[in-house]
Image: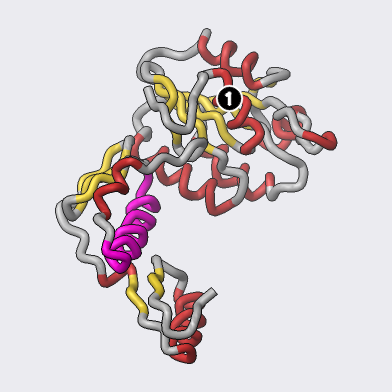
Amino acid sequence: ILKQGVPAVFGKQHPEALAVLNARAAELGVPVTRAEEFAITDLVMNERGAHFSGLECPLPGEHQVDNAVTAAQALQLLGVSPTGIEEARWPGRIEHVTPNPDTILDGAHNPAGAEALAKYLRRFYGTRKRWMIFGAMRDKDVKEVAEILFPVADELVFTAPKAPGNRAMPPEELQSLAGRGHIEPTVKEAYDWVLKQVTAGDAIIITGSLYLVGEARSLFLVTTLGRW
């Protein structure tokens, strides 16, 4: 997507990918701004987002700091103030929908998303009991996602998302994969069951499929513009 002479911003990359990008940019004469050139100062992170370099990022997770830096650099090149980043919303991605207990929705349906969620939970919810409601599609890399996410869950509850074409993996298969866990037919029943067990200091994470997260969002009447 690089175009001759058109400025580009490169976010944080794996070295192999960055080498390809740099070579192509040089070939096309593209002026490049790189994420590592951005001076991050006064970084403060919590479970709801981050503050750094005078910017507020309302998206939780260390990876979102990298994303915000890339966005800020692009906005600066366009002559637009990056302060608007504070209004950013990402439905279904480490999205907090209730407090006490914290309920978090995350469509971590691939290994990269699972890694980001697991890292977030270890950093910000490491001392809390974590209840994970999990449902997945058959055509996803469920085994690898499970190997990443299941170890960070103190309790696992499996269910099946409503999806076209009978694509949902039966919760019994997920339970067998995990070697533990409780089963409920729907995400609503799973959530209701967990609510009977949790205390205010616990965390509930609903994850594994965007279909599942979509169903959960409707339960909480969450809109793309609203946050509790």
Residue position for label 1: 216
Read off the magenta span.
61-79
Seen in the picture, residue 123 relative to 110 is either above or below; the reply is above
Seen in the picture, residue 32 relative to 132 is either above or below; the reply is below
In terms of image quadrants, where is residue 70? bottom left
Residue in the image at 34% along x and 73% along y? 34
Question: Looking at the picture, which amino acid does disc 1 mark?
Answer: Ala
Residue in the image at 26% along x and 72% along y? 37
User: Percent position (x, y) of residue 226?
Assistant: 41, 27
Residue at the extreme front of the image, as rendered: 79
- Kindly state the secondary structure of the residue where label 1 is placed: helix
Quarter of the image for the N terminus: give it. bottom right
Residue in the image at 34% along x and 54% along y? 68
User: Percent position (x, y) of residue 205?
Assistant: 50, 29
User: For residue 20: magenta?
Assistant: no
Density class for disc 1 (Cα within 10 Å; few <14, some 14-19, many ≥20) is: many
User: Percent position (x, y) of residue 192?
Assistant: 57, 11
Residue at the extreme bottom of the image, as rendered: 27
Q: Nearer the viewer, residue 81 or 66?
A: 81
User: Percent position (x, y) of residue 90?
Assistant: 45, 41
